[in-house]
Image (tube, coloured by chain):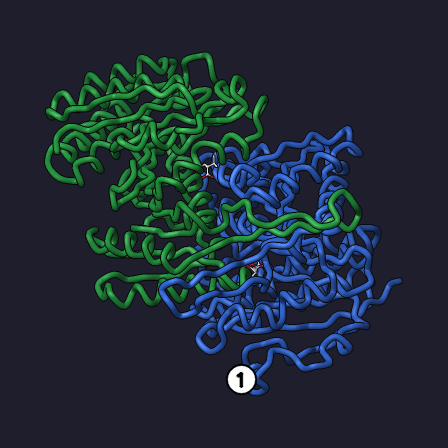
Chain colours: A blue, B green
């Protein structure tokens, strides 16, 4: 297969600003490596759409997207008008679940030219993947309130884990680690405090590790693991985590590389029964929206992950991915730079510069 | 009241090594500021005790401790023989709950003489408190497993929040912020993902903030909040968080100041109906136990918090607290240093040096 159908969802805020630049670079790379892309612009899944229709997406959203190979996604959220849990559960989190994008893959990497907030770290010292479970766990709307509105109010929130769900993300992470030179896997846990789900999660990790004798595994509690992302980043290779812990680690990791403005993510349905979704880790950033100063690199890098995944890491897609990442590296080294990295280039200028290097 | 009864629980691993040094310094300060301490050595609440008795504590543990004003606590845990969730739920977490120590107060501070893992940060740049809810929330043994041992296995873990529990920790945090010059409170949340408890938690914070017009409050999702502990530590003053989020932030914060080996904590029952408990944030560290190289500063600083709390932040206790913290500052500046800070001093030598400066 050499032609792929991609749905474009810009969303809210800076999602609308970084999307054109991501697209610019993806199209440049696709052209160079002869990958056919069929683009479908989607104008829903945004808080603007919510304002007009009282919901984030049309009822037939699934049908409209079902034929696509991938969703290229900006950012959703405009808390001034729609509470985050409404906008996110009505769009992004729905995609992740209903399209069974059970892997959230987030590379963490320190680049030359990006000032590192950690002292004495150089490119190469921080280079790992966070593999986040993306469809279950701590993110649920299950539970409820008792004695609501009174002094005695009690709120129950349920987390739900399944063997099916844990095993497939653990398997993906072990495979990834097994294919990397260091073959090291860190499993995030909190079995000393969260007394039902986390000891069980540890057990699933132990069971899976039996099938990967060459992978060294160590389990770390999320508190000390977070500390080590700062104190000992060189020890990480692949880190696998539940939905919530993966969310935290995949903002913290990029922060240690200078900014979460660069961090990409891939929400994968590895079975390819449903479209996968590629998006920056950052959000819609209402505070800087409208100025055309957002850094589009996370969006662009997400586009590289998309091309890579579409061709299953082989041939044209991998080459296109590598060319985009190399172009990002070039521009980070030599400029131009957006204000978050100390420059005064616009979002557009950055996209143009990276597209030029591809 | 000028005489206080303190139970000493060393626990496991380096808990046994740092306890004597903590005590040495606490006694020196008590002597200097004329505070009478009555000490009661407890030889249970350890994995050794578990090995002999099949439980972490005797059945009458509560009676044995009930008369005490404070528990001075080392560290519990020896995973080689007792799983962490057994040893911790059978001791530390029991104290926190059954003695209603609903505040876990954890100062985060960068000291001169401690190499900071963050680039270009100096003492004064990192100086805030994490106030952690300590008795409910995500830490529960509620829930269970369905279809256990089969492919269809499903695990439910419940978090439980109460208005009673949330309001009292929020109130404590607002009071603390209100008494600090900057009067700024950050509320950790994750209301965009954890859809029942966290939007509710945000609502409780909003309600409480109405009573503190001078305190500026901002709510931050735990993922970006973790990132900002690294990228923008100067913006924090007081941070209030649920049990789990507070656990993570109070390891991450100290990590950004160089080591969690220094971080103290106070598990407070502000009502004084039950003893409060003072302990290092670090654990029992089986890997370095037995060499007398553990850094005792976290234990010693916890002792300072204890003296401060015992006299309600007034008079002799506050003076003793300040003298201990000043002595810690002196020794961090001039040495001696334990191996974690690049020196070769022993645990004992460090304790002696700090006691000398008090
Ligand atoms: C040992 C563990 C149960 C404990 C916790 O998670 O509360 C520790 O990490 C802490 O922060 O005091
Ligand atoms: C916006 C939010 C619901 C989302 C998440 O927590 O998953 C985001 O933080 C992310 O990491 O993709």
Q: Position of residue B321 (x, y in %)?
A: 20, 32
Residue A179 quadrant: top right
Image region (quadrant) for ligand 2? bottom right
Mark 1 lies on residue? A51
For residue B303, side relative to residue A3 (left or right): left
Chain under disc 1: A
User: At 71% across and 56% down in the image, what residue appears?
Assistant: A102
Vertical side of A286 occupied by B352: above or below: above
Q: Is residue B291 visible?
A: yes
Q: Nearer the viewer, residue B262 or A334?
A: B262
Number of residues whose C-alpha sits closer than 10 Å to that of mark 1, classed few (under 14), some (14–19) or many (20 or more): few
Q: How many marks?
A: 1
Q: Is residue B119 visible?
A: no
User: At 60% across and 50% down in the image, what residue appears?
Assistant: B143
For residue B3, side relative to residue A58 (left or right): left
Secondary structure under badge 1? Answer: helix
Vertical side of A133 occupied by B8: above or below: above
Q: Nearer the viewer, residue A213 or A315?
A: A213
For residue A10, side relative to residue B18 (left or right): right
For residue B251, side relative to residue B301 (left or right): right
């Amino acid at each position: 297969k050499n032609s792929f159908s991609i749905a474009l969802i810009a969303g809210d805020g800076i999602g609308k600003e970084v999307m054109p630049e991501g697209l610019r670079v993806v199209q440049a790379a696709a052209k160079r490596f002869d990958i056919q892309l069929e683009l479908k612009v989607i104008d829903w899944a945004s808080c603007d759409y919510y304002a007009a229709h009282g919901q984030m997406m049309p009822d037939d959203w699934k049908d409209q997207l079902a034929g696509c190979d991938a969703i290229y996604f900006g950012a959703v959220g405009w808390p001034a008008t729609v509470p985050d849990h409404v906008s996110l559960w009505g769009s992004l989190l729905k995609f992740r679940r209903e399209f069974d994008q059970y892997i959230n893959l987030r590379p963490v990497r320190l680049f030359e030219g990006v000032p590192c907030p950690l002292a004495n770290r150089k490119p190469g010292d921080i280079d790992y993947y966070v593999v986040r479970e993306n469809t279950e766990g701590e993110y649920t709307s299950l539970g409820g309130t008792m004695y609501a509105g009174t002094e005695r109010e009690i709120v129950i929130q349920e987390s739900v884990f399944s063997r099916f769900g844990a095993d497939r993300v653990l398997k993906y992470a072990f495979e990834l680690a097994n294919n990397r030179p260091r073959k090291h896997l860190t499993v995030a846990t909190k079995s000393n405090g969260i007394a039902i789900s986390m000891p069980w999660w540890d057990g699933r990790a132990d069971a899976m590790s039996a099938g990967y004798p060459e992978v060294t595994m160590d389990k770390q509690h999320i508190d000390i693991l977070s500390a080590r992302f700062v104190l000992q980043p060189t020890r990480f290779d692949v880190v696998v985590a539940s939905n919530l812990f993966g969310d935290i680690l995949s903002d913290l990791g990029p922060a240690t590389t200078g900014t979460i403005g660069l961090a990409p993510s891939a929400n994968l349905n590895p079975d390819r029964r449903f479209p996968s979704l590629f998006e920056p880790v950052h959000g819609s950033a209402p505070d800087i929206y409208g100025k055309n100063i957002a850094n589009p690199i996370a969006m662009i890098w997400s586009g590289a992950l998309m091309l890579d995944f579409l061709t299953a890491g082989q041939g044209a897609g991998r080459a296109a991915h590598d060319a985009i990442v190399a172009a990002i590296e070039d521009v980070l080294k030599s400029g131009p730079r957006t204000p978050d990295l100390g420059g005064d280039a616009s979002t557009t200028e950055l996209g143009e510069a990276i597209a030029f290097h591809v």
